[in-house]
Every structure is written in structure tokens, then in C-alpha cells.
Image: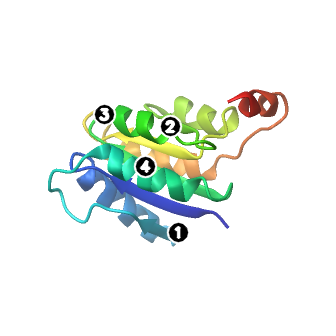
Amino acid sequence: MKKIFISSDHAGFKLKEDIKISLKKKKLKFLDLGPKNDNRVDYPDYAHKLARKVKISKNNIGILVCGSGTGMNIAANKHKNVRAAQCFNTKSTKLSRLHNDANIITLGSRLISKKNALKFVSIFLKTKFDGGRHLKRVKKI
């Protein structure tokens, strides 16, 4: 069973809360690593906190939300064994899992709609890594 971790900064807080509601409706267990409100915070603090949890086990998966998705992505990818993918559409989301074995999805709350964000999270959680020819490439990361 995958362990799901979720976190955001102040700009992504509302969307993070919407994603949590969706996960609860699907009866998926997750751990919210904060923040607990939309007061201003520094996104790297939350990206690093989540990345440290995700890299513990290959069964762990993460969801990060900030204004653009970019800052969280950059910070999370500083960690060994973390492959964070910034997702903008269904194809980028699906390929991030199929080909790159991404273990963290990063979303930009100012760039995508709630409806699309929920769809991307669902795709990310359901899609499995293809392995095969992609495995040797992922190992090079």
C-alpha cells in the first residue's frame, strides 16, 4: 500500500485542502505535512519535509502544491531518489509515472483549475511505472 504525503505553501493551501477532500472521498489515507493555514510560508521548507518522507520507501508518493508548481518541484528534486514532476495536463501527468516513475506530483494552484488538479492527482495515483526500457533511464537519474 502506498503512503501518500501532501503539502503546500500559502499559495497552494486552498488547492491542497480541496485535494485532501477528494482523497478522503476516495477513502485514500494520506498525511498532511502542512501548513495548517494560508499564512505566508517558504515553499522549500515544505518541499524538503515532504521529499524526506517520500524517499524513505519506494511505496511512498507525494503531492506538492504552490502557486506555480515550479518552486516545489525544484526543491523536491534536490533529494536523492526523488523524482518530482510538475504536471500541467493529463498527458504530462500520465507520462511522468509511466516513463519517469515520478514519486511526487507538483501542481501550480495559479496555473491550473481545481477540476484539472483533482484529475491529475487521480491519474498520478493510478498510473504505474512501465519499467522496461524506461528503467535503465530512470536509474541514470
For the residues bearing labels 4 and 2, Cβ distance under 8 angstroms = yes
Closer to the N terminus: mark 2 or mark 1? 1
* Mark-to-mark CA distance, 4 and 1: 23 Å
Q: CA distance from mark 4 to mark 3?
A: 17 Å
**Dividing the image into 4 quarters, which one contains the N terminus?**
bottom right
- Tell which circle, 3 or 2, labels the residue nearer the N-terminal end: 3
> Extreme left residue here?
39
Q: Earlier in the sequence, mark 4 or mark 2?
A: 4
CA gap, disc 2 and disc 1 = 28 Å
Between 110 and 32, the residue placed more toward the observer is: 32
Q: Amino acid at mark 2?
A: Lys
**Tag nearer the camera, 3 or 2:** 2
Q: Is residue 95 left or right of residue 13?
A: right
Q: Which mark is residue 68?
A: 3
Cα distance in 3D space between marks 4 and 2: 8 Å
Q: Which mark is residue 28?
A: 1
Mark earlier in primary sequence (1, 3) = 1
Mark seen at residue 78: 2
Element at badge 3?
A: loop
Tell me the SS state at disc 2.
Answer: loop
**Residue at position x 48%, y 67% from top?**
30
Q: Residue at x 16, y 50 (%)?
A: 40
The residue at 77%/30% (across/down) is 134
Contact (CB < 8 A) between labels 1 and 3? no
- The quarter of the picture where the C terminus appears is top right
Marker disc for residue 97: none
Rendered location of residue 38, percent (x, y):
17, 56
What's the amino acid at mark 3?
Ser
